[in-house]
Amino acid sequence: MLNAEALYLELLKGVKALLNADTRLVGITSGGAWLAERLQSDLQLPGKPGVISSAMHRDDFSQRGMVSGSGGQTALDFDVNGAEIILLDDVLYTGRTIRAVVNELFDFGRPSAVKLAVLVDRGGRELPIQPDFAAARVALPATQQLELARSATGAFSFNVEG
């Protein structure tokens, strides 16, 4: 079983190495937003991290609609133009959520660069999207889903379904 808290500490190191003065953290709802919130605090970065939703740009919107996890509101309380963005997600799988989120991000402006950091890369890519940093790489059957959970105290764990 994956230890989400141990992987978070690896993610913290990886994101710290990717940071520069113009970097802004943006978490993908919901697990990535939780990660961005905690990283923002642990790295003592000013302001609030951005939150971004893939819901409006998903290529399967007509089938899924506004499902849990892909919904939520995008909130970017900073100028995206010229900013270096680190997108954060809990689990990278097909790459389709990342494609949707990049489309959403560009609706708000043109960043100077977009990097991707994930807690877990589970492979299975359907699009040519790769993380700049992954705390872990695991192989799971396509029938299983890996989902980040957060306790009332803010501790992370994983749920495996299927």
Image: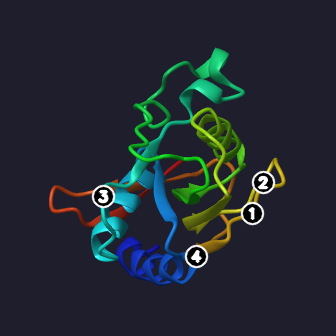
Nearer to me, 88 or 135: 88
Nearer to me, 33 or 63: 33
- Mark 2–mark 4 Cα distance, whole angstroms, equals 15 Å
Closer to the chain start, of discs 4 and 1, is: 1
Going by the numbered disc 2, the residue's amino acid type is Arg
Please report the residue visible at 55 percent of the width from the left and 18 percent of the height from the top: 65
Going by the numbered disc 1, the residue's amino acid type is Gln
Q: Which mark is residue 136?
A: 4
Mark nearest the camera among 1 and 3 is 3
Taking 26 as reference, is 14 above or below it?
below
Q: Residue 81's x, y, as percent?
A: 59, 47
Q: Are marks 2 and 3 in contact (CB under 8 Å)?
A: no
Going by the numbered disc 3, the residue's amino acid type is Gly
Please report the residue visible at 82 percent of the width from the left and 48 percent of the height from the top: 127
Q: Which mark is residue 125?
A: 2
Q: Are marks 2 and 1 in contact (CB under 8 Å)?
A: yes
Going by the numbered disc 4, the residue's amino acid type is Ala
Q: Residue 105's x, y, as percent?
A: 60, 41
Task: Place residue 154 in its image quadrant.
Answer: bottom left
